[in-house]
Amino acid sequence: MDPIEQVTDRVNNLLRQMTLEEKIGQLTQLGQYIPDTVPIDDRVRRGQVGSILWLSDPAEINRLQHMAVEQSRLHIPLLFGLDVIHGFRTIFPIPLALAASWDPELVEKVQAVAAREASACGINWTFAPMVDIARDARWGRIIEGAGEDPFLGAAIARAQVRGFQGAEMGSPGHVLACAKHFAGYGAADGGRDYDSAYLPEGLLRNVYLPPFHAALEAGVGTFMSAYMDLNDVPATGNRFLLEQVLRREWNFRGFVVSDAAAVGDLATHGFARDPQDAAFRALTAGVNMDMASRTYLEHLAASVQNGSLPVAVIDEAVRPILATKIQMGLFEHPYIDESQIQRILDTPEHRQLARIAAQRSAVLLRNEGQLLPLKMQSVKSLAVIGPLADSQQDLLSSWAMQGNPTDVVTIVQGLHNKVGSNVQIEYAQGVEISRQYPSMFDALMGRSQPVPWTDAQSQAEFGRAVELAGRSDLVVLVVGELANMSGELASQSSLDLPGRQVELVKAVAATSRPIVLVLVNGRPLNLSQVVEHVPAILEVWHPGVEGGNAVADLLWGDMTPGGKLTVSWPRSAGQCPIYYAHNLTHQPDTSPMFTSRYWDMASSPLYPFGFGLSYTTFAYSNVCLDRAEARRGETLNVSVDVENTGERPGDEVVQVYSHQRAGSASRPVQELKGFCRIALAPGEKKTVQFALGPGELSFWSPTESKWVQEAETFDVWVGGDSMATLHMMFKIV
Ligand code: BGC
């Protein structure tokens, strides 16, 4: 029997023996913190549970797994699911930062380490990668994805799936991955978390779905349905998404889990009449497993009993869950060896990778007068100022529950580690910042509400910071957002730097000391009021446990920043949503009439997609296309020479963009179609090649209602960001 038949055979064999209650049990994921009337042990023994959410204590995981395997009637092991998003114990930079490395190989390694640590503790399923496209920085969950672009998003999605799952499902030291949130969550109205999304089919298929499809091609075992309404139908009851696209068109063979409580919430949405209707609608739309709402557990049987739901439909939902457990080797290896955990968590190698990841994720946004890298001989006293400068928790960010804040090297510590006694470092917090409305995640993250400073304290601390700046050779000003200001339930209406941070920047700038602004944040923020006051800006995001050391490496020039933005950086929230791959209009930006689409502000972003500076310079030459014409289905090759023309080694992210000039639909002014991060020594030159084939040149046409590759003229640009000017043309005939 071939392996697939063997799995099917084992599934059939189990299904034949299962009662309805046991089948519904496999469709049920219980939430660790959700109050239940029945003790979890009883549910496990009775086979009423297929999976447990948020449990992370290895001893308890082992105990329950022993119970499921040894004391339940059919010995079916449990899946233990957790959000391992950017590390487990060793916390890496947030996903948006990892994407800014434009380095899928790095991303794969990071998620492989996350998987290794999580699986050592008994977690066998992560709710990642989050592959939602985000074009509105107000949406707090922009931090969890790869940014605005489907091509880059797809590459990062593939890398994450490979990292989490390994070469194949069941690879030792790896975990089952979950592509989420299917689909369109990032397009929430106004950037407000959980709000409805309205996406025409072309936009959905050309922009929002490709990273999901890439995850599927990379073999992702599960998908998570999203919370919100998509085009007036909740994603968790959305047959178009789950049945037509995912299963029929894409032939997905794994299983779908709902987002937390989303099955029950179909009634809250005003979509289902009551919990029984909610269970029926979610299951028949294609949600196999109910995360944490117990709506399947408590209400599915009634629909079977009243004849509205055939048991065969339940069987079909159970099949891929059992098949996944079999393919993962869970029946053969259900337990973990707790004695090995300490050997695997937070090792020096993992920390070293965290440091590299933070270095490679950083984006240099500004460097007037080559202020960076800092030079030891000219900086004898350094003021490190700002609410994020010495914070451990805020370098971790959200979804870092298993991380330990005391593991974190803060920026102040990292700078001390780097310069020792050669430079005198002093620190002042300057201002305090906090959310106006609390987040329910604070309790989960163990974050207590800080006691606000009195006015007198605020004034004194502000004054101390400015005074310190005034008597220092240079100021590193670390501003941005606390960990709880981005992520889930952390949307922001303004994008302004929270609290009195702008005031602080201006007051410090008034001392005329040179300032390096280091940004710690989960999303682009409004820098328009501060940018002119600071010669250098280094974006380090929430950089993880080794953040402080990585920042010191970058500021002192032991590493050269090479990351690039994966989102267009708005000048203010009023520009959102903003993205480079917008369509042409009747008055294009190149028209002589064009000034701005607003009368009060430029309509271009402050920093474009793909942008990032370096301490060295690069020259592009010899750009060529191997031919000027190709037939549909054929591939053209673009090549370009890139040379490091500066005096330091550095990395460049070479990018290729294309544009279809006419066709059955308007096409974006440009779209990323290839990228490659290369390392170049001073004076070194490399040739980089990209293929433009039908995959790159097709799109889903709203007038044809299908994928098309059209015989048209195309532009192609090559360069170091989306403003690339090296231009060529070709024709598809
Ligand atoms: C989030 C998901 C997450 C789930 C389980 C939800 O609130 O939207 O992304 O995987 O909780 O933690």
Image: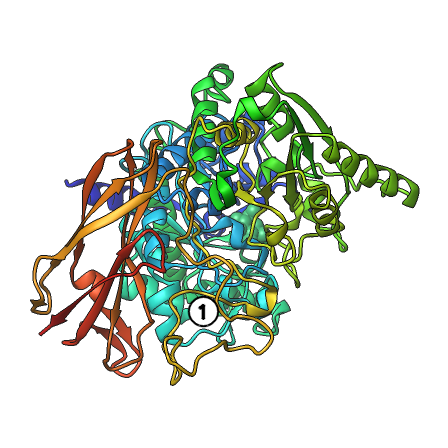
Coordinates of residue 680 in the picture (x, y in percent): 28, 35
In this image, 195 relative to 506: left or right?
left
In this image, 481 relative to 557: left or right?
right
Hey, which quadrant is residue 470 in on the image?
top right
Query: Quarter holding the C terminus?
Result: bottom left
- Tell me if residue 481 comes above or below residue 56 in the rendering: below
Query: Quarter holding the N terminus?
Result: top left
- Tell me if residue 63 comes above or below residue 340 in the rendering: below
Return the residue nearer the eye: 4 or 590: 590
Return the residue nearer the eye: 273 or 261: 261
Amino acid type indicated by mark 1: Asn
Coordinates of residue 321 in the picture (x, y in percent): 38, 47
Hey, which quadrant is residue 447 in on the image?
top right
Is any atom of residue 628 visible in this view?
A: yes
Return the residue nearer the eye: 160 or 513: 513
Tell me the residue at 48%/24% (across/down).
351
Tell me the residue at 39%/71% (across/down).
582
Tell me the residue at 59%/36% (across/down).
396
Coordinates of residue 341 in the picture (x, y in percent): 49, 19
In this image, 474 relative to 68: left or right?
right
Coordinates of residue 305 in the picture (x, y in percent): 50, 65
- Tell me if residue 310 comes above or below residue 147 in the rendering: below
Is any atom of residue 64 visible in this view?
A: no
Return the residue nearer the eye: 581 or 373: 373
- Tell me if residue 387 comes above or below residue 548 in the rendering: below
The residue indicated by pointer 1 is 238
